[in-house]
Image: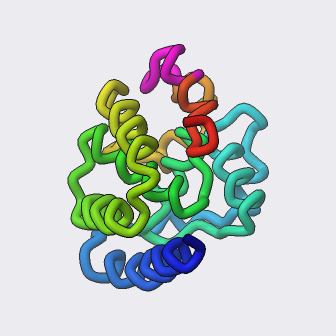
Amino acid sequence: MNYRKNLIAWLFEKSQKIYGDLFVTRKPWGIKKSELLNYPEDSFGKHLGLFLNDNNFELIPKGERHDAYHTLTDYKTKVEDEIALQYLCIGNGKRSLYAIGAAIVGSLILPEYYEYYLKSFSIGRNANAFYHFDYKKLLLMPIKDLRAVIFSKSQIETIKITSYEQI
């Protein structure tokens, strides 16, 4: 199975830049991880900075929204979680070529996670729409309040335990 996960990781790595350069018209935020880590403790921006720091990442110019989704939903960065996050976003209404392509390719290469993908899709479908937010404008908002606007209390609890190991 590792070779299949490595293949998907390689595909993600190669396709992100190409897709961003060709199809993403958003302007980069121009914010560094170190700046986010100086935001107030309960803010979405601080939690985004902590996510980046914990994973040894920097924000990807024009791809910042993806890390915002991770932070908002608490999905991890393992390959199966990346695919599940795409399913969650598609369920929420995101219809980008990248999200749909990642979900299809991921499902074909890692079909053993299909139940996890469906559960993630359902969470996204039942949440209030969040895929289109301008997250840069929400960086100072308390993360707890942001999650409460999007997810019900039971969805927040489900997200906290949603991982492949829990299914």
Left or right: residue 69 compared with residue 140: left
Please indicate whether residue 138 sits to the left or right of residue 142 in the image.
left
Overall secondary structure of the magenta stretch?
helix
Q: Which quadrant: the N terminus?
A: bottom right
| 33, above or below 137, in the image | below
Which quadrant holds residue 121?
top left
Q: Is residue 153 covered in magenta?
A: yes
* Residue 152: percent from left, percent from top: 46, 16
Q: What stretch of residues is rendered in magenta?
A: 148-157
Judge whether residue 7 can be spotted in this image.
Answer: yes
Query: Which x, y percent locates residue 111?
Result: 38, 58
The residue positioned 25% from the left and 59% from the top of the image is 100
Where is the C terminus found, in terms of image quarters? top right
Is 123 drawn above or below residue 100 in the view shown? Answer: above
Horizontal relation, residue 161 to residue 81: left or right: right
Residue 32 or 58: which is nearer the viewer? 58
Pick whichever, 6 or 77, lies toward us.
6
| Camera-nearest residue between 62 and 81 | 81
